[in-house]
Structures are given as structure tokens and as C-alpha cells.
Image (cartoon, helix red, strand yellow):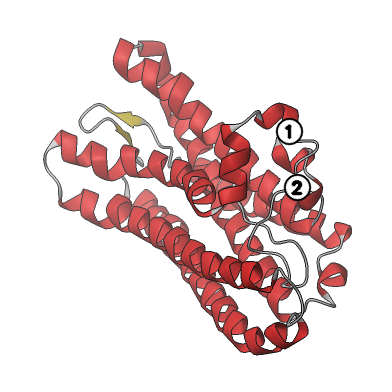
């Protein structure tokens, strides 16, 4: 909603963030309007269709992590190449990245699972979505799901570390350029906020993957399986906006007032655009 109304998000970063948020909306909606009634009301027809609902969840999750990767690259370029940034992430290239963020999961999350009959049906013991058990599905689960997800999250971490380094490297020059600017201190504070945001978001995705793929396999109690899978999976997509709200005072103040009415007139300051521009962050 804000990406379509705020001038500060009418750019490549805003479009990438909106695309990623759209996938998170679908994922959370499936948990809310499909999973919750299925479990609480024990609806047999929902359980029969749960295998395909699980694939939708997997697809949306993959869209989110690939979008996060492209957003991380966007932030690195914004900090490292502020002059060339607008040419690198022009409207055409941004559309290509958004297309890739959805096209790659179409192959990894949908085609590979459907072609090998590796659906994600709902499992009553543990209240989670689990991959069908077979030799082929074990290979798909390890290489296409586990290795891919950890690989993408590792790349995000590497890019974020490079961005943090570039923030430190460019900080002295930016301080000299803005020595006579009253907003110099505010920009420096946003740099620190950006570092915190990178660390938290990277830690959240890494923790979720560890719980879902590793720790859940060590559990025998249904409640623990539920916490390590379903709860971890849904929480990772709600912590992102919480990080945004908690670490950005301007956004937090806007939401505490009248967000819809003020969205068209309020400029929100974020922490991910080039240092010489108004910064942004993602949900």
C-alpha cells in the first residue's frame, strides 16, 4: 500500500519491496484463511487440498528469499555506486529482477515438486506441511529446498556484509561532503539503523531455516514439531515488517497516526537508499 502512495518508494527499491510484500501477503493469507480453519475446525476437504496449498506456501517463501537477495544487491549498489545507481536499477532492469524472483520459484517450488510428485500435504502429527516420503522427494527436499534456501540466505548475508563494509568505507567521505549539512547526524544514525536491520533480518531467515530443516527433524513431540515448522515459517514473514516498524521512527509515527490519510502526503525516511538520497527499507 505504501509503495504505491509514498514518493520515497516510487523507485526500484520500492517496486522490489512491493513485489516481495505481495508474496508475503499471499503466504500469510493461506495460513490465516486455509491453515487455521483446517486445523481448528478439522475440515476434511481442506486437508485433501492441503498438498497444493503447501506448494503455494513454498512458492511464496521462495519468492520472498529471492526478492530479499535482489533487494540486498539493490542496497549494495545504492551505497557503493550512488551516481550509477539509477542506471543500474532502472525500470526495465527492475522488472526483469521481479520477473526472476517469481520465475525461479515457478521451477524450483512448483515444477520440480509437481513433476516428481513431491507435494506438501498437511500432517496431523505436528500440524505442519511435510514433503511426501520417497527417495526422489528426499533428493528434492535436500537439494532443491534445503541447499537452495541456505545458499540464497548465505548470498544475502555476504551482500549485506559487503554493504556494511561499504557504509563504513564511504562514511568519512560522506561526512566531509555533508559537513555543513544539518542532516549529517541523522544520516549517520540511519547508517547504524541499516546495520542493525541487516543483522536482524539475516538472523531471522537463518534461524528459521535451521529450525525448519534441522531442529524439527530431531523432535518427537507434536507441539515441538509445530513450533519448529509452522510457527517458525509464519513468524519469519511477520518479523520483517516488525523490524521495519521498530527500527524506523518515521514509519512508526506515521502508522500511529492516520496511515491511509497521511500516506499520500508524508515522506518517510528509510535507511537503504544512497547516502545522498532519502533512505528506504523493506518489509
- Place residue 232 in its image quadrant: top left
Q: Is residue 139 visible?
A: no
Q: Which mark is residue 267?
A: 2
Q: Determine crowd level at label 2: few under 14, some 14-19, many 20+ residues with C-alpha closer than 10 A.
A: some
Residue at the image point whose x is 23% and y is 49% from the top = 216
Give the mark count. Answer: 2
The residue carrying mark 1 is 262
State left or right for residue 232 relative to residue 145: left
Q: Is residue 77 visible?
A: yes
Q: Residue furthest left?
A: 220
Residue at the image point whose x is 43% and y is 42% from the top = 118
The percent position of residue 103, horizontal first and vertical second, equals: 68, 51
State left or right for residue 232 relative to residue 163: left
- Looking at the rendered structure, the secondary structure element under dot 2 is loop
Q: Which mark is residue 156?
A: none
- Looking at the rendered structure, the secondary structure element under dot 1 is helix
Q: Nearer the viewer, residue 9 or 46?
A: 9
Q: Is residue 130 above or below residue 200?
A: above
State left or right for residue 120 relative to residue 28: left
- Place residue 66 in its image quadrant: bottom right
Q: Is residue 210 above or below residue 237?
A: below
Q: Earlier in the sequence, mark 2 or mark 1?
A: 1
- Place residue 225 in its image quadrant: top left
The percent position of residue 143, horizontal first and vertical second, equals: 42, 62
Look at the image and tell me in which quarter the N terminus lies: top right
Residue at the image point whose x is 81% and y is 65% from the top = 89
Q: Nearer the viewer, residue 272 or 248?
A: 248
The percent position of residue 238, horizontal first and vertical second, equals: 46, 41
Q: Nearer the viewer, residue 131 or 126?
A: 126
Mark 2 and mark 1: Cα distance apart in space? 9 Å
Amino acid at each position: 500500500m505504501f509503495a504505491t502512495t509514498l514518493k520515497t518508494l516510487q523507485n526500484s527499491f520500492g517496486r522490489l519491496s512491493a513485489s516481495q510484500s505481495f508474496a508475503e501477503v499471499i503466504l500469510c493469507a493461506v495460513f490465516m484463511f486455509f491453515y487455521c480453519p483446517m486445523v481448528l475446525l478439522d475440515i476434511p476437504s481442506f486437508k485433501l487440498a492441503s498438498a497444493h496449498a503447501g506448494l503455494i506456501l513454498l512458492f511464496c517463501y521462495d519468492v520472498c528469499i529471492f526478492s530479499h537477495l535482489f533487494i540486498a544487491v539493490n542496497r549494495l549498489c545504492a551505497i557503493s555506486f550512488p551516481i550509477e545507481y539509477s542506471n543500474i536499477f532502472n525500470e526495465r532492469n527492475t522488472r526483469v529482477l521481479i520477473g526472476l524472483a517469481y520465475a525461479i520459484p515457478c521451477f524450483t517450488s512448483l515444477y520440480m515438486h509437481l513433476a516428481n510428485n513431491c507435494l506438501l500435504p498437511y500432517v496431523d502429527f505436528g500440524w505442519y506441511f511435510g514433503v511426501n516420503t520417497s527417495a526422489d522427494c528426499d533428493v528434492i527436499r535436500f537439494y532443491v529446498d534445503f541447499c537452495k534456501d541456505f545458499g540464497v540466505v548465505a548470498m544475502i548475508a555476504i551482500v549485506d556484509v559487503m554493504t556494511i563494509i561499504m557504509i563504513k568505507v564511504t562514511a568519512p567521505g560522506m561526512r566531509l561532503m555533508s559537513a555543513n549539512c544539518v542532516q549529517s547526524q541523522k544520516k549517520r544514525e540511519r547508517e547504524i539503523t541499516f546495520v542493525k536491520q541487516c543483522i536482524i533480518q539475516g538472523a531471522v531467515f537463518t534461524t528459521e531455516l535451521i529450525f525448519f530443516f534441522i531442529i524439527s527433524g530431531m523432535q518427537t513431540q507434536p507441539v515441538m514439531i509445530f513450533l519448529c515448522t509452522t510457527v517458525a515459517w509464519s513468524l519469519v514473514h511477520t518479523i520483517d515488517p516488525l523490524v521495519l516498524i521498530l527500527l524506523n521512527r518515521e514509519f512508526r509515527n506515521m502508522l500511529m497516526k492516520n496511515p491511509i490519510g497521511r500516506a499520500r502526503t508524508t515522506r518517510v525516511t528509510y535507511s537503504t537508499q544512497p547516502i545522498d538520497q532519502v533512505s528506504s527499507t523493506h518489509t
